[in-house]
Image (spheres, helix red, strand yellow):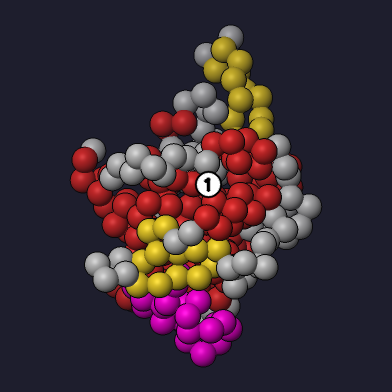
Amino acid sequence: MSRQPDEPPVEARADSASEAHSSGPPTLPEDLLLLLFRPEQGVILFRPEQGVIAGETTLFYALAGAVLADLALQGALAAQRTRAASVDVQAVQGKAPSDEILLDAWKYLSDGPRGVQTVLPAIGPTLRQPVLDRLLARGDMRKEKRTVLTFFNTTVLREGHSGRRAGLVKDVRDVLVDGKEPTARTAALAALIWGSGTLHQFDPEIPWNSSVIDRARRLEEGNWGAGATGEAVTRTMTAAIVNNVISATASVSARQ
């Protein structure tokens, strides 16, 4: 999928966000990237193709979807169906988020309605590094020096000592494996993992079987159960965002 000529990436805004380590609670894109991190692989930082992050080639779509979903959960994003059955999103005035990364996207969406399929490639490509920087700053991930072949010094990524990734995996596993009713945030997170096409890579942490797939698909459709707080419009909006992530990811995968 190509970006429309009048929809450039918001690189200038992302540059400022990359320097801002949030002191507030973790954002949804932070949680998503931490979950997609494969700590057992310890990938060399200058060799990202080795796959330290699951779904690396389409990661920016998933992270952008997480930004939009986070804004939706905060009531900072409005959506409407177009005549072509696509979805346009727009920032809700007076609902500017305090987090810098989310604020950059909110400002970008303050100019007027934009199609989700246009927004994802516009805000997504510059998200990986600032989100990764935050995980490192929080101690959720860490860098480790390593010597390869006795004389090559390199740096690998390792899981930090916060224990937060294990907690996130448990939350998603409780929903997808044990059928526990999710919070709205966990529902969105699990739906985004499914939408990114990486859920099967969590096996055996989250077994890849028909019941897990069925539950993930229900979350994708916005069927979060009575326990997931939030208005129906937020569920519908998040479902539309996840479906656009799925479409964008599938389009890229088909070209590879």
Q: Place residue 141 in its image quadrant.
A: top right
Q: Using residue 239 as the reference point, say whether residue 228 is left or right of it.
A: right
The spot of residue 250 in percent (x, y) is: 27, 52
Residue 251, image x, y percentages:
25, 49
- Residue beneath disc 1: 37
208 or 6: nearer the eye?
Answer: 6
Q: Is residue 86 above or below residue 138?
A: below
Q: Quadrant of residue 242?
A: bottom left
Q: Residue at x 52, y 55 (%)?
A: 111
Q: Quadrant of residue 134 in the image? A: top right
Q: Is residue 24 above or below residue 237?
A: above
Residue at 76%, 57% (x, y): give it.
24
> Which residue is at 21% across, 40% downward?
255
Q: Is residue 225 magenta?
A: yes
Q: Secondary structure at mark 1?
A: loop
Q: Residue furthest top?
A: 151
Q: Is residue 164 left or right of residue 223?
A: right
Q: Measuring 31% from the left and 52% from the top, which residue is drawn there? A: 248
Q: Position of residue 53 (x, y in %)?
A: 48, 43
Residue numbers of the magenta segment:
215-238
Three-letter residue code for mark 1: Phe
Question: In the rendered structure, does residue 80 fall within the stretch colored magenta?
Answer: no
Query: Callout 1 environment at 10 Å: few (<14), some (14 to 19), or many (20+)?
Result: many
Name the side, left or right, on which 159 lies relative to 10.
Answer: right
Mark yes or no: residue 234 visible.
yes
Is residue 60 depicted above or below 185 in this figure? above
- Residue lying furthest bottom in this view? 226
Depth order, front residue of 111/60: 111
From the viewer's perspective, tell me whether residue 65 is left or right of residue 148.
left
Q: Is residue 160 visible?
A: no
Residue 17 percent across, percent down from the top left = 66, 42
Q: Nearer the viewer, residue 54 or 149?
A: 54
